[in-house]
Image (cartoon, coloured by chain):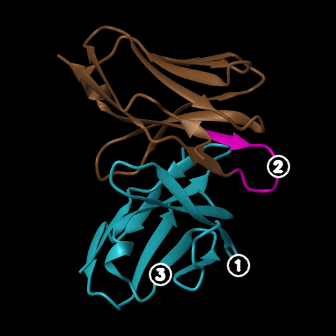
Chain colours: A brown, B cyan
């Protein structure tokens, strides 16, 4: 049972436009959400996170929106750049215990065309 | 964020042999490290959580006698794949905890078992 779902395996966007990556979750215990960017044969790079007490967090070109009632979050990248082309993973963490384990979605391959 | 290195980046071994992968936290004392595995076009799956000075906590379905984890210091955790088989071929990635609930990943190790 997949607790974090990224239903779009791929997304193609024109340079300068907005990229919107979506993520849904099923576990109501999740209270912290993260986005990672990954290039082939490399480890994921942390991009941005959001706590469930917020509905928006912004960092430069990246904004994450959280809709708790819908159990949905999205990552907006604007303006998109060719260097943003990578696989983007959504991850979630539940409060409890001494270690905050992350549960990942399957990722969305973003291609930004020049 | 924390800087994490892994060694080797790529290893090919024969079936039945053991392989050790090192994960180092270069600028951060990591009491907790995480080991993930990623199969092609799949999500990152948490294998185990390693705590400095104590036994690792393995996720359901991960054989602790096959995937030996040692976290002897605050900067080094090792994963040993014992008696490797072709189905163990995968991309293994370690991560350390950040100051909040984010994790910082190493560059990964591509293991190929022939």
Viewed as shown, does residue B66 lie left or right of B100? left
Q: Which residue is mark 2?
A: A96
Q: Between A20 and B7, which is closer to the camera in this rendering?
A: A20
The answer to whether marks 2 and 3 mark residues whose Cβ atoms lie closer than 8 Å is: no
Q: Which residue is mark 1?
A: B55
Q: Residues within 10 Å of mark 3 (few under 14, many from 20)?
A: some
Q: Start and end of the magenta stretch? A: A92-100
The answer to whether marks 1 and 2 mark residues whose Cβ atoms lie closer than 8 Å is: no
Kindly give the residue lying farthest to the front in the view shown.
A1
Can you tell which quarter of the image residue B12 is in? bottom left
Q: Residues within 10 Å of mark 1 (few under 14, many from 20)?
A: some
What chain is tagged by disc 2? A
Q: Position of residue A98 (x, y in %)?
A: 79, 56
Q: Residues within 10 Å of mark 2 (few under 14, many from 20)?
A: few
Q: Which residue is mark 3?
A: B80
Element under disc 2: loop
Kindly give the residue lying farthest to the left in the view shown.
A114
Res B100 visible: no
Can you tell which quarter of the image residue A104 is in? top right
Q: Residue at x 62, y 43 (%)?
A: B102
What chain is tagged by disc 3? B
């Amino acid at each position: 049972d997949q607790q974090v779902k990224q239903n779009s395996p791929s997304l193609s966007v024109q340079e300068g436009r907005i990229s919107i990556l979506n993520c849904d979750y099923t576990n109501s215990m999740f209270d912290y959400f993260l986005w990672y960017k990954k290039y082939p044969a490399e480890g994921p790079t942390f991009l941005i996170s959001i706590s469930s007490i917020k509905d928006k967090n912004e960092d430069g070109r990246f904004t994450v929106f959280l809709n708790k009632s819908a159990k949905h979050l999205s990552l907006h990248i604007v303006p998109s750049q060719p260097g943003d082309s990578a696989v983007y993973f959504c991850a979630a963490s539940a409060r409890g215990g001494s270690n905050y384990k992350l549960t990942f979605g399957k990722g969305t391959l973003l291609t930004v065309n020049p | 964020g924390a800087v994490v290195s892994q060694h080797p980046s790529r290893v090919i071994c024969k079936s039945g042999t053991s392989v050790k992968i090192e994960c180092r936290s270069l600028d951060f004392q990591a009491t907790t490290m995480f080991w993930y595995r990623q199969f092609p076009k799949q999500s990152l799956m948490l294998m185990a959580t390693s705590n400095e000075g104590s036994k690792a906590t393995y996720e359901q379905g991960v054989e602790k006698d096959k995937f030996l984890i040692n976290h002897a210091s605050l900067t080094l955790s090792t994963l040993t794949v014992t008696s490797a088989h072709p189905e163990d071929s995968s991309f293994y990635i370690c991560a350390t905890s950040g100051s909040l609930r984010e994790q910082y990943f190493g560059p990964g190790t591509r293991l190929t078992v022939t």
